[in-house]
Amino acid sequence: MIAETCDLESVAQCYDKAAKACTRRIIICAGTGCVANGSLRVHSAFVRAIRERGLAVDTVLRAEGEGFDDAEAKTLVTKSGCQGFCQMGPLVSVEPDGILYCRVKPEDVAEIVEQTLILQEPVERLLYTDQTTGRHCHGTNDIDFYARQRRTVLKECGTLDPENIREYIGHGGYKAAQKAYTEMTDEQVCRELIDSGLRGRGGGGFPTGKKWDLTRIQPKGKKYIICNGDEGDPGAFMDRSVMEGNPHSVLEGMMIAARAVGADEGYIYVRAEYPLAVERVRKAVDDALAMGILGDDLFGTGESLYLHVMEGAGAFVCGEETALMSSIEGKRGMPSPKPPFPAQSGLWGKPTVINNVETLASVPLILRNGAAWFRSVGTQTSPGTKTFALTGHVVNTGLIEVPFGTTLREIIYNIGGGITDQEGVVLEDGFKAVQIGGPSGGCLTKDHLDLPLDFDSLRSVGAMVGSGGLVAMNNKTCMVKIARFFMQFTQNESCGKCVPCREGTKQMLALLDDIIEGRATKETLDLLERLARTVQRASLCGLGKTAPSPVLSTLRHFREEYEAHVFEKRCPTGNCKDLADFRILAGTCMGCGKCLAACPVGAISGEARQPHTIDTGKCIKCGACLATCTWNAVVRG
Amino acid sequence: MEEQFVNIDGKPVLIEGEKNLLELIRKAGVDIPTFCYHSELSAYGACRLCIVDIEGMGIVTSCSTLPRGGMVVKTYTPEIRETRKMTVELLLADHDMRCPTCGKNGTCQLQALARRMGIRDIRFKPTRKPLPVDNSTFSLVRDPNRCVLCGDCVRVCAEIQGIGAIDFANRGAQVTVTPAFGKNLDEVDCVYCGQCARVCPTGAITPKSEVEAVWNDIHDAKKTVVAQIAPAVRVAVGEAFGLEPGTVATGKLVAALRAIGFDKVYDTSFTADLTIFEEAGEFLQRFASGEDMPQFTSCCPAWVKFAEQNCPDLLENLSSCKSPQQMFGALAKDVLPSDLNVEREQLSVVSIMPCTAKKYEAKLGKFERKGMPDVDHVLTTQELARMIVEAGIDFNLLEPDSLDMPFGFKTGAGVLFGASGGVSEAVLRYAVETVEGRKPASIDFHAVRGAAGIREATVELGGKPLRLAVVHGLANAKAVVEKVRSGESNYDFIEVMACPGGCINGAGQPVYSDSKVRDKRTAGIYAADKQLDVHCSQENPYIHRTYAEVLGEVGGDTAHRLLHTGYQNRRRLNHAEMALHQGEHTDRVNVTVCVGTSCHVKGAQKLLSKLIRYVGDKNWGQYVDIKATFCMEACDRGPTVNVAGIEINHCTMDKATEVLDAEVGKLLATVEVRAGKAGYVTLQDFEKQTAAGILRFLETLSQDKGCAGCQPGPNGCGCEH
């Protein structure tokens, strides 16, 4: 059944009333990372513990007509989407106390209930401890990881119950959509977006308002709106977090987009590997339909919009818009040449707008607060904020949101807490590079630490914002191997349609293997570079055109590292096994004989209590000696 | 509208409705290389060879770019040169490079491009892991090791033929073109038209060669080898020797065949004339009676297989005439042994065909008599050209020779079969005179000629309008079939040829890349008609003589035995029939129970067991055959049981036994009941035998291609597949 047109105001009032009836709210992060670490068990432990303590507890906010009851003060225990600080999960926030507990286990719950709920005191051992100062941080306000971010799109991801549409409405949700349908013309909506300067967060950075306007001006008739939730970059989970944490913001963004271009049907294409996102987005669509927010006669205007949730089948290339559309059409997900652009001829040949999740989630905020507000953060050409998935050799990994124009230094050192070694120990001056923008992006080096990051500055140094993956690398990282890693990824994920991408990535991979395994010559390096440029120039779609980026950008910034591999047959970081010779430091070796016994090919010789030696001709570089030596006398390189 | 120009390499070129920049540039005389572009197919943009540099846009593929006035295009810059060269080099690194033994050696586009780009060295490593070659059909060989993944075959099969027997599978470096689930071509809906082979730029899909077998027959002193030449071959064979496409080279062809060692050389156009007598005769009967209308032609084996697979409901509408190739084979094997004084076993009939599906057709069991095929071997035009070269014959120096009589005599109508619309025109030339008793005003029926995929024409015949449709390309055929089914169209006669343009564009014809070749060959067919003295089949004196001496009447018994055939519904698993019990008496009542998915869920299995028990109880074992079978295509009316040819729908035990009792009763009344019970099976044995039979049956099924449920009857059997 489809409900009558929804009165947002009364829903919000009911919600407020219900919210006021709850004195405390415990929010347990139910993002994928925290769920994997057991946050759902923590959630049920809270409900049980509070009940056992004789306090009133509820897990949903009940409005009038749904069992609303303000007879006694209640504690509300809800789940939220990803709160970003995944490394520290399961995360538990207690409001209005403003406390954030980290790595909470079910057995900690009773103590929190006793200490915080009853005695109003924080449990110190569960607070975040600043690694450098040793200080216990009370909540998000004094944790650098959060305090230095500017969370706008992600703001409500960590607080709202993503499965409760009333809560979203209570926080002003769907008002922007209502405004777009009832107070603005399609042209005005596009104008507002153009004025805001919002650029696509999916990688390309194309101005969203312009994209909409191009679709709007197509002849009236069937048009589609698509939300691209096929986030596939290794290590990226921005879109996932938004879909899991605040699915209604994406829906609202789609409604506004539909209004702007005149679409009455849309698809949300989500990776099947994101089951939680699929579930929550599906529920959001069902709830919105049931409340009369989606469906027919939107806000009494006679317009209609129906949304379908579609699961991808795991191909990276389906994030490319033409491939995504053929996947929705039930065909093999392969890109097709542009033009025609989706705005002219997209899904089933109809004008189509296709936007990324984060882009769409930004839209309601722009309509609610105005273009000027949006422009007040970020840079001139890239206004607003951007989410990044920060991973790799940094202290704090997780999901962050910063204004465009923030420097890499701020992100790595102040938010990320600095560079670590492989074991997680902070390294002074350990920074080597970041890979930004996933497998299609490029690397940034020390020279770029103070570069304000935005679409254009990154492009000028041969990298890209991409979807926002940020992998930090310490100085023990071999950049040739990094290039190979990403090349392996794109090679596997190439759809195989066009020759340069299908064959070129395969051959680039083979050439990188030659370099890493010591077979390369000067010609190899030259051929690799020429091939990379050919693939970049001639590939059919964005995936192919950007596939050589990791190679080209590492060649640009770390050529000497390549040259060491090629000409000296040496890996400066000692990571490439085939290039590294194992040696025993005569001065350090105690002649204990452990390595001699461990060597499977008898390459080690030496008298007892005398320094041993390795016959490099026999050595198969298995590393057994290195692993057994207790004196640190075996070295590689 | 104002004239719009594109500046191509400094020269202004007028846009005249070209659908993409590539066509415009080619018009301007620059040969842009491509693998994946075919004007008849959708632009695909995968080979990246047609890149050009457009001012303000950079490097783009010209196949997917619309020409716009004012564009400034450069077709050969250092960047383009390097990119194209490297692209071809990448393909070569991934290619099976055993060129000398490849069927496409010399006509391969990859070879040609490598030569053109001056590639002398492949700097990349060979990466290809050998994949198995698909040799499963009589028509085509699919060698994925030679595939460049341009997708031409995939698109021609899906877009032109509406079949989609092959498609891409896997990702990245593992991508292959393959039938579904890695099956072989003989296990899927391939109709063997070979259009995939025609568009394949390399040797990944090629016609299967029968050259060795033909040489063996020729070199076998005991054998008499006769050839029949299909109409379309004469206008294309010359291309293999540098002649202009469309050149009518019948005389040289005959001389070449004799030089190779063929004992007699005949013309398939003769049996095309014969087809007109039979098919037009059949049509005029139907046209008068209105039964089984419209009539579809049946000369194209790819279309026939397509119809057997997709239109079992319309098989009655197909002309029952064999194709001219098979008519020739049947007639030759019937007449020539005595005429040429050879043993039937020592007569080898070889057809020279433009077609790969003809190879499959010749191997069909229904075209075999006394264990010998009517047509022993089928050579494509390409194969024959190769034999001529192999034998060291200089085709161009040959003196034209004439065909052997009587089967070498044909009229222009018989030759028209080579082009789309030709059969219709030949029928019209015959029908108008036959019905109206006078020659038509003009024997040229331009209404049925042309290049459009579906052409319609109405011709007055005996005061009645005769509505024709001429279709080529099976996707078009599919569309017309839908119109016939829905009643939207009311055609009387529908000519279908699988290949675009008809037989002249068959997959066995010489390889070409110039899109004008097809039209030139068509023109050649009409020129060949003009060159002959007689143009209507009814004017062929040898046909009349053949009827008088061999066939009797048109449509008569002998004609039927030799010249007509039946069709098989390929949606039904005909061979998947299990005899559960076989009686031993000479006259028996046949009981068939459908155990297809739909009938099964409605209780067919129980019914079958009960019937077996019933027959046992009645002691009728020797008079009854019981079989389980798959889909009788009455899925909505199941369970379906057939007793002595009577189909019982919604069958119950009562309904079945009522008919069975009556039929066995009838039988018993006519036979002498044997004394004693020696020949009877006990009930116990009977059921034991049945159980073993079911097991055997299930085993054969599990090896089969699928269950009947996958190929539901017209009403859909409700199977989940």
Image: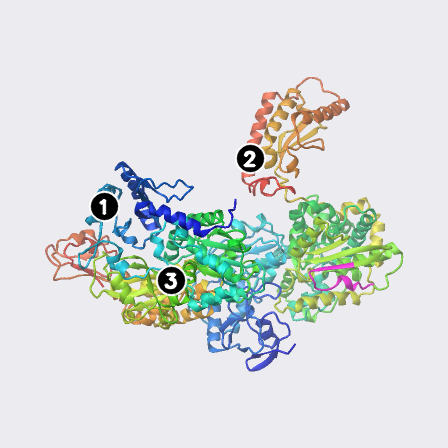
Q: Where is residue B223 in the image (x, y as percent from the top left)?
A: 69, 53
The quadrant of the rendering that contains the N terminus of chain B is bottom right
Q: Distance between the residues labelled 2 and 3?
A: 52 Å
Decide which of B408, A225 is in the foreground and name it.
A225
Range drawn in magenta:
B443-457
Q: Which of marks 2 and 1 is in front?
A: 1
Q: Where is mark 2, residue-wise? A: B698
Numbered badge on residue A116:
1
Q: Relative to A375, is A230 above or below?
A: above
Is residue B453 found inside the magenta-colored segment of the image?
yes
Q: Distance between the residues labelled 2 and 1?
A: 70 Å
Residue under the image location 75 percent in, 21 percent down = B672
Q: Where is residue B227 in the image (x, y as percent from the top left)?
A: 71, 57
The quadrant of the rendering that contains the C terminus of chain B is top right
Q: Where is mark 3, residue-wise? A: A439
Q: Where is residue A68 in the image (x, y as percent from the top left)?
A: 38, 41
Tags 2 and 1 on a common chain:
no
User: Badge 1 sits on which subunit?
Assistant: A
Tags 2 and 3 on a common chain:
no
Q: Nearer the viewer, mark 2 or mark 3?
A: 3
